[in-house]
Each structure stands twice: as structure tokens, then as C-alpha cells.
Amino acid sequence: MCGIHASISTTAFQTQSEDLKQLLRNRGPDHIGEVQAHIHSNDGSSYWVSLMSTVLALRGGHITAQPFTDISSGSALCWNGEAWKIGLEPVAGNDGEVIFDLLLKASSAQKSISESIRAVLKVLQSISGPFAFVFFDKLHSQIYYGRDRLGRRSLLLKDNGHATSLELSSIAEPASGPWKEVEADAVYQFTCSDERLASEPGHSTNPLLSRVKKHTWDVLDYESAVSMAWKPVIY
């Protein structure tokens, strides 16, 4: 079991409360890691992205540090779960490392945004097993998050009700605000780059949620997804 936390802000890097950080450490007491990045969008806006993972080492004395990070691209992955298979092939080695490597190839600089989205979704949709994740594609300024089709790993979203930030976490402080469970029916994509990739606003007062798109698990390829009307994400 591991802990995941991510925040997206339009004002500054966000930090967890000490109570929430301790809850995440309880899930992963063997390692804590953090990654931060500042994105300047092509529409003139800015985003401060913070990722944190806590790790529980279950096998041997080796601890695999998280978030998984790639120095050359700046991309990162918070992973909590088990990938039994990718496609039809059993996973050999550390599943998080295998998945991160595939996601880096899917989001390489040689691909356009649309090509990268298609490739990233293909990787995520090929994973069998219980999992929750946050993948930050720094090169294309996209953040993907979600959990497996049966919702066997927890992931919560906190909409602060204002226009400046969103939070994702494996666990929440009961008294800290309006946390809601991320539905297990889709991969969610937050775009920091292209307004045309954004969804129509839902019922939330937070305009950041209008930048979240929902790719349902039962849509098997990106071409099918873009041919459908985008579903607004409503919290």
C-alpha cells in the first residue's frame, strides 16, 4: 500500500496539512518523495503542480522511490497498486517502473499533443490489476489520474470551491473539506495547455474542473473518444 497526493494551483505550490501528510505516511512509512513543476500555458495562464508519494516496501530490503521521475522530460508518476498484466503480457520486475517507462515513450517529445494523448490512454487502458495513479506529462502539460475499473484502490478529489486549486489524495482528513471519490469509470485528463482540449463546465464553481476531460474505460481508443461528445466532469 502506498499514498498519493497531487495538487494543481493557479497561484503557488500547495502543501498538505501536517495531519494529511501523517495519514499518507501511515500508508507508506518507508519512503516519502515530492516533485514540483511550474507550467506556463500557451493561453497565458500558469499552473503550479505538486506530486507526493509515500511508499510501503513489501518485498525484501529494496525500496523503490516514488514519485517515479524522468530528469530529461520532467514527467513523473505516482503509482499505488499492482499491474498483473499489460495487454496480454504478465509484468516482469517492478510494475510501477514498467508502466512509467511505457508512459514516457507514449508522451515523448516526438509526439504531438493528440498523438501523446492517444498513446497514453492506450497504455493506461491496457493495465490489468488494482491501481490508482497520477501521471504528469510535463512535455505536453497534461495530468492524467484515475483508478482501475473496479475501484479497488482509493483516490479522492478535493474541490475547494474556489478558482485556484484542486487536490487529489489516496486518503483525506474527515474535517478538512469537501473530498469526493474519483469515479472508477474513466481516466481523467487535466490539460494545462490547449483550451480546445478542455471540457464544458459542470456544476462546480471551480473553473479548473472545466479543464478536466473524462475518457471512459469502455472507450478502447482515442479516435472513438474524440468522435463522442465530451462529458463534463461534475462534482
Image: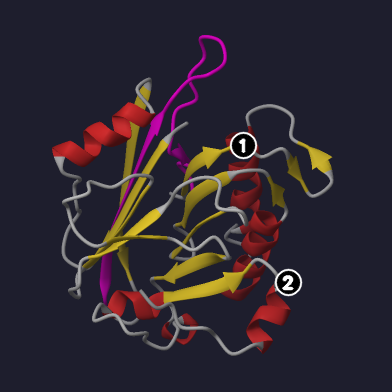
Q: Position of residue 31 (x, y in %)?
A: 37, 24
* Magenta highlight range: 45-72
Q: Return the disc, 1 or 2, that comes first in the chain's sequence.
A: 1
- State whether residue 58 appears in this view: yes
Check the image and report above or below for 142 versus 147. below
Please report the residue visible at 62 percent of the width from the left and 37 percent of the height from the top. 82
Q: Residues within 10 Å of mark 1 (few under 14, many from 20)?
A: some
197 displayed left or right of 110: left
- State whether residue 112 appears in this view: no
What colour scheme does the image use?
secondary structure
Q: How many marks?
A: 2
50 displayed left or right of 161: right
Q: Which residue is mark 1?
A: 82
Quadrant where the image shows the C terminus = bottom left
- Asked if residue 234 lies in the magenta stretch, the reply is no
Q: Which residue is outermost to the top?
A: 61
Amino acid identity at mark 2: Asp
Q: Which mark is residue 233?
A: none
